Image (cartoon, grey):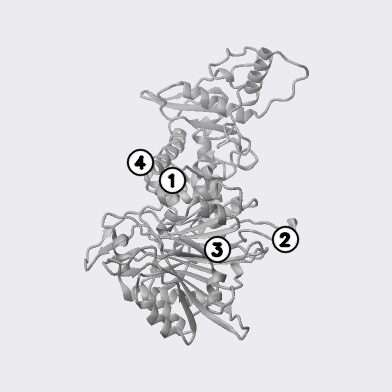
Amino acid sequence: MEVVPVEERLRKAGLCHPALNALQADDTLYRVFALQPEGKIRVTDSFIGNSNADEAKQRISLLLQRVLEMQPDLVVCPEYSVPWDALVESIEAGVVPETGKLWVLGCESLSLTKLQEYRERLSPVASVLDDDVSTRERTTQQYRNPLTYVFKTQLEDGTGERLVLLVQYKTAPSGDPANTEATGMLPGRYVYLFGRSPHEVRLMTLICSDVFSFSRELITQYYQGLLLLHIQLNNSPRHITYKRYRQELFEFAGDTEVLCLNWADNIISFQGDETEGMNWKNIGGSAWYLRPPEMDVSDEGIKENHRHGVYYTNHYPIRAHALQFHYRPRAFLLQSTKVIHHGIPKPRSTRTGPRALKTFVWTAATSNWLEAAKPEDFPDDGFEKLLGDSVAAPTDLRDVLSLYANGPATAERAMAVSAGEFGPEPKWHRPSNIDSMRLCEQEIVRRITITQDTAQEAVTFRSTRLGAVKFIAELRASGYQWPAPVEFLRQGFSFHWSGNIPNRNVVAADGTYATVIHAGMPGDLRVLDVIDQRARKTLAGPPPEPDKALSENDEKDRLKQHLASKAQRLCIIYSTANGPKNFGSERALSITAPAVQSAVDFTVPSFHHKNQDD
């Protein structure tokens, strides 16, 4: 792989570098239209693309007409998704981007001599450019895997403007048991780089397994101020070889954003002339990774994006925010701040990231793209169904649904407290710090209010977390004997969460707040002591300053007294073969009869990691 500045390639054709709205490093916003298509593909020795040519042509032609009406600044379609006939005929019909707009279209495979035909056909209205070189000798290869940039730019001689189709070829074949691309695809050599630093954002696009050749040397050279588009047709987008580059990109303390765009989940693949396809059972995996300092992680912003199927997570291992797209087929219209600002006064330089504006789905009834407007048109995160499916006996969880209606982050927080996963950091309830909203290195989505991730770790996490909530809810109708510190719960309670009292998850019928934790069925009861210690440290907060210097033992006694007097209205319940039991904490005893110090030393700081938001 060699990175070639677009300016150099265009100069050879007598063209200027385009001035693209999305790449101006200023404080204006830009709009992105991203297609996550339904996955029905056909793979032959000479072709990879949509299995139903006529339907795909209709869908993409009408999609480009929709794009023409909206004129977003950046349009992105994934690998192998755009039929050439749809693109060429649309251009001939005048469906082209306005000046300053850029289309990034992953097109169906292209036979080795076909581009010349399109070049001649479109010559009256556009310049079709490519670099017909390869890193390999031609043997069995019959096609290219092309990405087509479509934009307008000025002629170098100043005589006018020209529409350009710049075709980039995939540089590295993807792997599969049949060696499909290794046998049939002729790889390219060049990856084109838009943007001129420092006054412009830089943009490049990698096609699926191009990332195999995206070396640390190239990353080091180009990461700063980069908007990287990674378009894919990938049955395993979270595979280590496909996501390693993201870890390496975000190792650097620069301004980098990555938009990964795959096909929708459950791609059906047809081999040759087969009429029975194979379901890949893949996830969608489309996501936007970024870390602007003023990223909008407000409850209102998360809720609005969530409604459109753009779900907040925090990729803690790489210290980046990751907006996960709903897995089902859909087109997304988003508006975002720029990757970098250059020459902008600090009071105006606020980069808050993407905000979902609209989504569109293809409807068979109208044979057209429908903008989501009614509640049933919007993506279904699956949470309400999860609540219903989790309840074998009638358990009233309407209060949990009410929390969810206030915002998905509110529900995630209340459920985290119910499982004892809160604190001791005061900012634990920020969305980027909530345990269920964080990604692990494997990028498993563990959010409870999103059920689309079918990985076993995600399913188990959701089940366990929701199980804690359901267990507590069922105690309301069981006549449970609540211990003295929370005996007021005997009259009834509801799940509750508020930023003013972030460490409480229930409110009693008389309005008293409490913290109720279900700790599951622990194999080692010492785990309960750790949960108790953590919860009490969080509820009590830091102790007041002492009036005078204290010995080490006196300081420990002072801290124990602080926890005993300030961490009130806490109940930890655990399951046994004989039913639920309350955990009797020594820290809850009267300060006049201080408990013997537990085996767990709560004077040891519990902040294992620096808080991301500090």
As displayed, is residue 425 above or below residue 403? above
Rounded to the nearest angstrom, the CA distance separating label 2 from label 4 is 57 Å
Which one is closest to the eye, mark 4 or mark 3? 3
Among numbered discs 2 and 3, the one appearing first in the sequence: 3
Residue 34 visible here: yes
Percent of width and height locating residue 516: 52, 32
In the image, 402 versus 53, the foreground residue is 53
Q: What residue type is disc 3 on?
A: Leu
As displayed, is residue 128 above or below residue 537? below
Q: What residue type is disc 1 on?
A: Ile
Residue that numbered label 3 is attached to: 203
Among numbered discs 4 and 1, the one appearing first in the sequence: 4
Q: Residue furthest front?
A: 137
Mark number, residue 444:
1
Mark number, residue 392:
4
Residue that numbered label 2 is attached to: 344
Among numbered discs 2 and 1, the one appearing first in the sequence: 2
Locate the N terminus by quadrant: bottom left
Rounded to the nearest angstrom, the CA distance separating label 4 from label 3 is 51 Å
In the image, 522 versus 57, the foreground residue is 57
Secondary element at tag 3: strand
Percent of width and height locating residue 186: 35, 66
CA neighbours of label 1 inside 10 A, class few (<14), some (14 to 19), many (20+): some
Q: What residue type is disc 4 on?
A: Ala
